Structure formats: C-alpha cells, structure tokens
Amino acid sequence: MAMDVVDYEIKGAEMQFVEVELDPGEAAIGEAGSMMFMDAGIAMDTIFGDGSAAQGGFLGKLLGAGKRLITGESLFTTVYTNQAGGKQRVAFAAPYPGKILPMDLRQLGGTLLCQKDAFLCAARGVSLGIAFQQKMSVGFFGGEGFIMQKLDGDGLAFVHAGGTVVKRELQPGQTLLVDTGCVVAYTPNVNFEIQYVGKIKTALFGGEGLFLAKMTGPGTIWLQSLPFSRLASRIFAAAPQRGGSKEEGSLLGGFAGAGLLGGLIGGDDE
C-alpha cells in the first residue's frame, strides 16, 4: 500500500497535540482514545491491527492485532479517512506531559523501534509490529526495553515522549548507558544490551534499579527525561495508602479532621 503523504502541525508546549491535514481520500491511523477532534468530513472506522497491506486477509489482521496485544496496546486501531471534497483535519492528543516527535520513516531507513506505549498516530500505510530483543539478558532483565514497537514504512509516524526529549547520534562503537525507561526510540542498527550496574550497594540504594540499557552505535536514539512509569510511581507514592484524604505536612489539619469526626460520632449539635 502506498503511504499517504500528510501535512501536520504540532501545537502546545507541555501538553501537546498534533493536527494532521488530510487531502481527499487520505487517511491517518491512531491509537484508540488518542483522537482530540476532527472535521465533519472525516469518517472514523475501527479495525483490527493497523490496516496496512502486510495484514491482508483475516488471518493477517488477527496476527497483527495479536502483536499489538503483546505490547500492551489495544487490539484495535482507528482509521480516519477524508471523505470530503477538500482538505480536512484531525488532531491527536498526547496522553501525559511531554513532546510529540514527528518521525519520517523514509529518512530513517524505513524502520524505527520505540517503546511499546510511545506510538500516537501515523499516516495510513505505516505498519505497526513488535520487536523482541534477541539476547536473553534483555528478556529477563530489560523491563521496559524488552518488547519494543516496530514501525515500518516510508511515511510519517508520530511518537510521544515524556518530559524533555534529547536526540543523540551515536558514532560507530560509541556507547551510552541509559535507564531502560528513558529510551523512547532508536534506529535498528543501534545495538541494545542490558548491563548490570556493578555494585550491590548502588543497586539496592541508588534508586536506579539493577540494570541499565547499553546502547552502542552507529545510529540515532531518542531519550525522554520523564518515563511514564517513573511519573506513575511518584504519584502512587504520594497518594494516601489507606483511603480518604491526606493533609500534606499539616498537623493542624489532622486535629481538625479528628475534631469533626468526634463531633459527628458524639452527636455534638452545638
């Protein structure tokens, strides 16, 4: 299937969304629940997999959907097709604070590997698959870096990253050690391995985990400063663990709550 060539505009700063412009007959694919708004001339259709030519036939579609399920994504994607006579627009919103990265797969050699929850939307024709890391150490200890999404094609795909994004060009033999959750995407010629941090004390008390991603060039990598897993763990740690509400750092708030509860139980009607 020929790739649709779409125009786009990324808007916003911390909470971004991408507005994709479709010519008549063109279409974009998006993750379920990522659509923000669309013009009235766009038809929305939910399908198995990604609707690419590689998934011809029912068995191919079922296999493609199953691959998406392995990465933790929905079995379905949504196709947005311009059925009007003029240009129409559809917008896709980022799920949490960060940046939306436009990836031109043609300029990246036709393939990009990214974190399993990084894909946001793409031009019709981009194929969504999975890539297992081949080394057993990555499989056992890689965590977020074990199963990656694989984007194939020569069109535009949009990837979401948390916090601030940095792009690094690795020269042949150049190595960078990265927290596994901070890896957003990389070109397939980058060698991805898992390396033990080296010291038990650092592993137990350093707060960075037991293993790091060892990425060796040549190739391009994109890193994020705020992985969603890190954000979620901080929110969970700050939330009340026994139900109800919690007044942070306020002893007076605790006394006030206790007094109110005592009044209700004791029938204080003054």
Image (cartoon, rainbow, N blue to C red):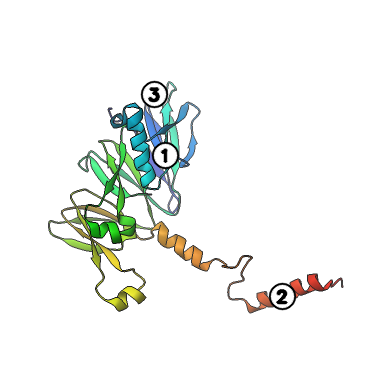
Q: Which residue is mark 2?
A: 258
Element type at mark 1: loop
Placement of 115 over or under 48, stated as above or below:
below
- Cα gap from disc 1 to disc 3, whole angstroms: 28 Å
Element type at mark 3: loop
Dividing the picture into quarters, in which one does residue 258 lie?
bottom right
User: Which amino acid is tagged 2?
Assistant: Ala
Q: Which residue is mark 1?
A: 75
Q: Is residue 84 left or right of residue 130?
A: right
**Lower position in the chain sequence, tag 1 or tag 3:** 3
Residues at circles 1 and 3 in contact by the CB criterion of under 8 Å: no
Closer mark to the observer between disc 1 and disc 2: 1
Asked whether residue 51 is in view, the answer is no
Closer mark to the observer between disc 3 and disc 2: 2
Q: Which residue is mark 3?
A: 24
x and y, in percent, of residue 254 in the image: 66, 75
Asked whether residue 147 is in view, the answer is yes
**Lower position in the chain sequence, tag 1 or tag 2:** 1
**Lower position in the chain sequence, tag 3 or tag 2:** 3
